[in-house]
Each structure stands twice: as structure tokens, then as C-alpha cells.
Image (cartoon, rainbow, N blue to C red):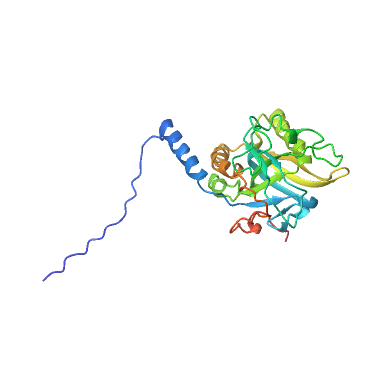
Amino acid sequence: MVAKKQETKELVVRSTTAVALPESWRQELAEEAKATSAQETPSVQNLSFRSGVMSFGGTPVPANKLSCIVIGTAFERTFYDGPFDPNKIKNPVCFALTTDGEGAAPHPNSLHPQHETCNGCPRDQWGSAGEGRRGKACKETRRLALIPADKLESAQDVLASELAMAKVPVTSVRNWSNFVHKVGAMYSVPFWAVVATIEVKPHIKNQYEAVFEVAQQIDDVAILQALKTKRALVEPFVMAPYGMATEEAEVAEPAAPPPAAKFVKKKA
């Protein structure tokens, strides 16, 4: 009796000559990806400027300077109930998030909304900080989503790169705004099309400030396309709301943060 030859089935990957997806399909997939992402709470590690020391995940950044690409931004307004206590961190009792700073209003997660809209809110008036200070009780700042500059080796590296979040100190928001205008005026490109250098420096009045400079312009088309795609993916991160505050201190650290060493390279 002759044994039959055993047949094996191999997975055949067919090459395709199909044209690119129609624009309608691209839009539909992008909208579904955005909706799906909005259902998940993103968890990323923070780049901190506290006390004038730049650190990522508790690891000091060498020379207080970091090269990166700012891939996304959000306008943030926060009002806290009581003075800041580093040992008893609380969520803001009223906050607002927008992509362009327009039409800001208290987020539904705000425990104690101070006004129907940010425009006209008494906490947004100069001098409302109290104790004789001329500042505002509601702090206006920027959230920045960053990726490391060394991820520009390929489009795949850009898309797979880890993300860090930074909150620009209130006293340094003007520096960020000036940087955005400078990039547009000198290079005719948006802020995400250049490698930025962020440095924390001493300041005679504000103790310290974050300074933004252009390291180089990005001119690789494939890299720029990957950065543009990445921007759409990071929007849920920069627009992630605070949890609703309680009368007690809360705010847990993000779960399972990525290792700091992957973003900040230590000196040899």
C-alpha cells in the first residue's frame, strides 16, 4: 500500500496592484479610529518642569534640555480649590480643554463649575488669584504631546514612538506662543514640522522658565506624512480630561507607565 503524500497548506500572501483606498474610506476609518480611541483612557508618562528641574518619569533630563517633536497641543484652563500642596495632589474642581482656545467652557467632569463659559468667568479676571496677587485664579496653560527627536530615522519609527506629555508652566506659555509664531514666520511650516529644543532656564522673576528653540526643519516627505498621521492618533491623549475631583485628595499616578530611559537618554 502506497502512502499518500501528505498535503501541506501554506499561507500565501498575494501581492496586490489595487489602488489606494478611496478618500471616503480613509475618512470613515479615521473617524472610527478616533471614536474608538475616545472610549479608552490614555496613559502616558509626563515630562515635568517642577522646581526648574526637567525630568521624565522621575529621571532628570541631562542639562535640563531635550530635543523632541511637539506632535500635538491642547489649551487647558484649571481652577483648584485651595493652595497647591505637592504632598496632597488634587484634581482641579473646574477645568476646560480645547484644541484651539476658542469657546472654552467647564468640562462635564468639573466638580464645581465656576461659570457657564470661561469667557466672563470671575476666576478669569486679573487679580482674582487673591492675597494681593495680580494673577488669575484660573490658570491658562498648554498641554504638549512629544516624541523623541531620535525617532525620525523612519516613518515606522515615528508611528511606533512612545509619547510624553508636558504641561507648559503658566509663566512660559508666552514662550511657547512665540515659538509657534517664529516657526511659521521663518520656515512657513507648523510647529510639528521641526525638531524643537526645550530647555529649562533660571528666571529672575519666575524662578525658572521653559524656552523653546528650533533645532532643525524636517524636510523628509515620508517622515512628515508619518508625523501628520501621528498627530491624529495623539489627540485623545492631549484632550484626555481629568477625573472628577472630590472633596478629598486624589489623583493616582498613571498605571504601568513606560520606562523613562526609553525617552530620555542618560549620558554615558
Task: Name the residue furthest bottom.
Answer: 1
**Image x and y of residue 9, in percent:** 27, 57
Count every numbered label the image shows and give the total: 0
Residue at 16% of width from left, 69% of height from top? Answer: 3
In this rendering, does residue 218 appear at all?
no
> Furthest residue to the right?
204
The C terminus sits in image quarter: bottom right
Q: Quadrant of residue 143?
A: top right
Check the picture and name the quadrant holding the N terminus.
bottom left
Residue 48 pos. (x, y %): 72, 51
Q: Nearer the viewer, residue 69 or 250?
A: 250
The answer to whether residue 135 is left or right of residue 142 is right
Residue 150 visible to an observer of this rendering: yes
Compare residues 32 and 247 and report the one nearer the observer: 247
Q: Hey, which quadrant is residue 125 in on the image? A: top right
Q: Quadrant of residue 219?
A: top right
Of 212 and 195, the residue lying toward us: 212
In the image, farthest residue toward the left: 1
- Tell me: residue 150, above or below residue 213: below
Left or right for 164, reference 31:
right
Residue at the image position 64 percent from the left and 45 percent from the top: 146
* Residue 209, image x, y percentages: 80, 44
Viewer-closest of 125 and 218: 125
